[in-house]
Amino acid sequence: MSSEIKGPGLLWVTSRIAPSAVDILDERTYLIDWYDNTHIAEIIQTKGIKNAFRYTDVEKGTPDAPRPYLAFYPMLDLAFTQGPDFKHITVKSDCLPGSGICYDLADIDVSYLALVGKMEGNAKKGPAQYIMTSAIEPANRTSEEEVNKFYDEQTAAISKASNYLRTTRYRLVYARTNAQSRKLKGLPTTDEPAPEPPTWQAVHEFSAEPASDVRDRVKANPSEVLKKARQNELHVYKLEIAHGDKKFFE
């Protein structure tokens, strides 16, 4: 087990129905029959994961949302993902067509994100209806102090919105695509290299969809960290359903 995969954090999963499966797998079967009623229902019965949230990118159907479906799982200890109970969670179901294996039907990216900070805003009453995610891969030699300053300034600007709730901040500790996920589950796989997504991410929570000027404020940030970043991703997601205890590091 990697020494970094431990402590509180998120299992962060973005996906899309694979182009090769669009003729046999519809959105309702994938998101409701498989995700909500089968996969997540099993996950929240484990000892290590008691909460799950499913969101959809508001720009679904555009090039800006290549994997529009988001599911994430807050965990008190990411080390649970390294044990047998997690590895035995099923990835196959009769509700799915063809082989019934989710990795044969969907392109799925998984990130393990370690919680590094929280900034409370307005009082939360249940899950956030919308979240805005800001992820960056800083340029080489960018210090952690510089990254934290960048996110502090971003959060301060966003927090002025009337529907802002709070922000949590994360550091990437591991990532996998279908190839590595298939290996984890003992399925035939390929030598596809592990992905290299952005290494830092903030999740800004809102009670309603953030206005376009809030997004523009984030994109227009004059920070040198943002200007020089090797990767910079900004997404807004709408809540579809919350499962289990419905707690997100409350």
Image (cartoon, helix red, strand yellow):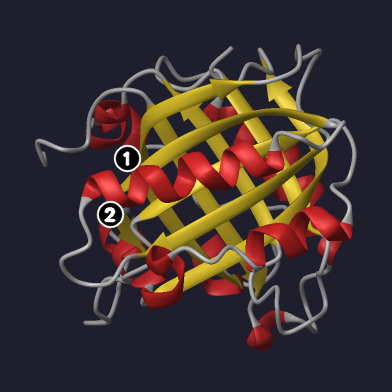
- Residue 97 placement (x, y as % from top left): 70, 67
Residue in front for this viewpoint, 218 or 82:
218
Taking the spot 20% from the left edge, 54% from the top edge, the residue there is 143
Report the number of discs: 2
Task: Locate the N terminus and report the quarter of the image it occupies.
Answer: top left
Q: Is residue 134 visible?
A: yes
Residue 92 sits above or below residue 241 on the image: below
Task: Locate the C terminus and report the quarter of the image it occupies.
Answer: top right
The image quarter in which residue 241 lies: top right
Q: Is residue 39 visible?
A: no
Taking the spot 48% from the left edge, 39% from the top edge, the residue there is 152
The image quarter in which residue 181 lies: bottom left
Question: Mark 1 near mark 2, Cβ–Cβ under 8 Å?
Answer: yes
As measured in the structure, the alpha-carbon distance from the residue carrying label 1 to the one carrying label 2 is 7 Å
Residue 87, which numbered label?
1
Taking the spot 50% from the left edge, 51% from the top edge, the residue there is 91
Please give left or right for residue 58 compared with residue 51 in the image: right
Residue 184, which numbered label?
2
Q: Mark 1 is on which residue type?
A: Lys
Residue 102, which numbered label?
none
Q: In terms of secondary structure, where does tag 1 sit?
A: helix
Residue in front for this viewpoint, 83 or 204:
204
- Residue 248 placement (x, y as % from top left): 60, 22
Of pointers 1 and 2, the one earlier in the residue sequence: 1
Residue 231 sits above or below residue 186 on the image: below
